[in-house]
Amino acid sequence: MRKLFGHPDSGHAYKVRLFLSVAGIEHDYEVVDIWKPRDQRSAEFQSVAPLGEVPVLIEDGQAYAQSNAILLHLARSTGLWGGESSQRMNACEQWLVWEANKIGMCLPQIRSYEKFEKEALLENALPWLKARYESDVATIESALSHGQTWLLAGAEPSIADFSVCGYLFFADEAGVDVPLNVKAWLNRLSNLEGWQHPYQLLA
């Protein structure tokens, strides 16, 4: 049995629930109030969350934390969305490591500033983050600019797609532009059976 802890504002939690939803994997789901101090969150969540953050996936009594690590576990254990071969898994791993230090770092911070914490960034931080975003989204645009449907070659998406899209469905809230090929890719993701917007899927 699986249980996922998440929150509608977490693009990281979204990555994991998107995998589970598109794969049709049954699981329980609980919203964690990430705006409460960590010591005021549910006792169950505190007992299983090693870093006090969402997402956390419980599977057969074992807790898995950090979104990209959870995606790698799920792909390996199910053989889906990149887990079909060692070659695809290796390619996924490269994208997931890239995402964590690139768009998965800058875009959530920009969105947080624009939506929640207007005074929370140092004066020069926002221009730096936006420059990082422009560089990172250009990398994704380039990867999709030669008629490639998904980030990895093939007819099916992978955890590379689920990871990288995590916060791009919040791009409007961050006030950033999304280039044409990335928009088309997000549209393809939104047409997958089981897809929902983060605010629906994580409600």
Image: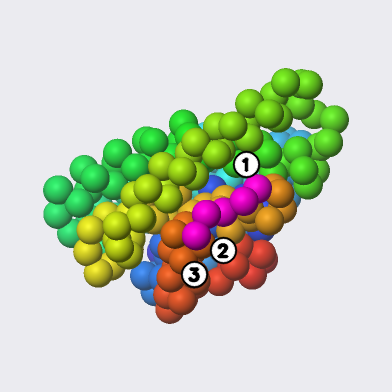
In the displayed structure, 190 sits above or below 135; it is below
In the image, which disc is placed on residue 173?
A: none
x, y percent for residue 197: 59, 67
Residue at x 63%, y 35% (from the top left corner): 130
Q: How far apart are labels 2 and 1 at the CA level?
A: 23 Å
Figure quadrant of residue 125: top right
In the rendered image, which quarter contains the N terminus?
bottom left
Q: Amino acid at mark 2?
A: Tyr
Q: Amino acid at mark 1?
A: Pro
- Image: magenta residue range: 176-180
Pick out the residue farthest to the left. 86
Q: Residue placed at 72% from the left, 35% from the top?
A: 39
Front-most of 133 and 98? 133
Q: Magenta segment, principal secondary structure?
A: loop
Residue 7 visible? The answer is: no
Instruction: Please say whether residue 12 is visible from this viewpoint.
Output: yes
Q: How did the renderer colour the structure?
A: rainbow
Q: Nearer the viewer, mark 3 or mark 1?
A: 3
Q: State the residue position of label 1.
A: 108
Disc 2: CA contacts within 10 A as few (<14), some (14-19) or many (>=20): some
Residue 121, picture quadrant: top right
Question: What amino acid is found at the position of numbered circle 3 in the picture?
Answer: Asn
> Left or right: where does residue 26 sit relative to residue 38?
left
Q: Which residue is mark 2?
A: 29
Q: Residues within 10 Å of mark 3 (few under 14, many from 20)?
A: few
Q: Earlier in the sequence, mark 2 or mark 1?
A: 2
